[in-house]
Amino acid sequence: MTDLFGTSVLPGLSVRGDLVTAEEEAALIAAIDSTDLSPFRFQGWTGKRLTASYGWTYDFDTGRMSQGVPLPDWLLPFRDRAANFAGLPAEALVQALLIRYGPGAGIGWHKDRPAFEHVIGLSLGAAAIMRFRRRRGTGFERAKLPLEPRGAYHLAGEARHEWEHSIAEMDEPRWSVTFRSLAVP
Ligand SMILES: O=C(O)CCC(=O)C(=O)O
Ligand SMILES: [Fe+2]
């Protein structure tokens, strides 16, 4: 993340505007909406956001990783761009997660599963703020990243391993596509 002066304020976090065009954004949103999305489930608890996962997937009910449905062809050109932005080979991004956040949906404080390493997210629809926090003494150190539609972010290093992130409940719908690489065991 960079401030007005272009200095990085959270090591390991990078952003890129306009990873996709407005036309591609509309097509991606239509493709996500025509996918069979299910309410995100976490140990029996059902969240408001709708998701579909491809490739290597962490099953929150069993706590295991397994290889699921391969990434659909329509995602592959965007995986290429995400990989290029992150400086990774496209094949390293073995997981893709589609999310639709309807009104009232957000995502609570978390770090992504340790089985994954790099996280590259593409934002579509309404602009949102990704919030970051890490424990410092008795409180939290905090940071914020504006997520512009059609832009992408890359979470790696300290931003990915030491900081939690969340997105507050939204009034307007937002969609995201996140690609992940596997952590080297
Ligand atoms: O919607 C997003 O961009 C973030 C999603 C997220 O943090 C996650 O799936 O772990
Ligand atoms: Fe996350």
Image (cartoon, rainbow, N blue to C red):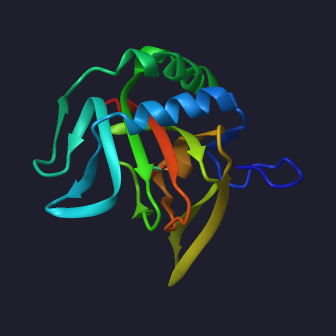
Tell me the residue at 71%/33% (across/down). Answer: 18
Q: Residue drawn at (49%, 22%), measured in percent from left and top? A: 79
Closest to the observer: 97 or 63?
Answer: 97
Q: Residue at x 15, y 48 (%)?
A: 63
> Residue 181 in the image: x percent, y percent?
40, 29
Q: How many marks?
A: 0
| Viewer can see residue 19 | no
Percent of width and height locating residue 96: 38, 32
Q: Quadrant of the C terminus?
A: top left
Question: Looking at the picture, does residue 72 appear above or below residue 3?
Answer: above
For the question of whether residue 166 can be seen, the reply is yes
Q: Residue at x 53, y 51 (%)?
A: 174
Question: Hey, which residue is sitting farthest left in the picture?
Answer: 62
Q: Relative to the observer, which residue lies in front, 126 or 106?
A: 126
User: Can you give x and y, in whole percent of width and height, for residue 71 in the image?
Assistant: 34, 21
Residue 20 occupies which quadrant of the picture?
top right
Position of residue 142 relative to residue 179, above or below, is below
Residue furthest out toward the bottom: 138
Left or right, residue 173 beside residue 50: right
Relative height, residue 1 to residue 97 (above, below): below
* 141 shown above or below 160: below
Residue 65 in the image: x percent, y percent?
19, 36
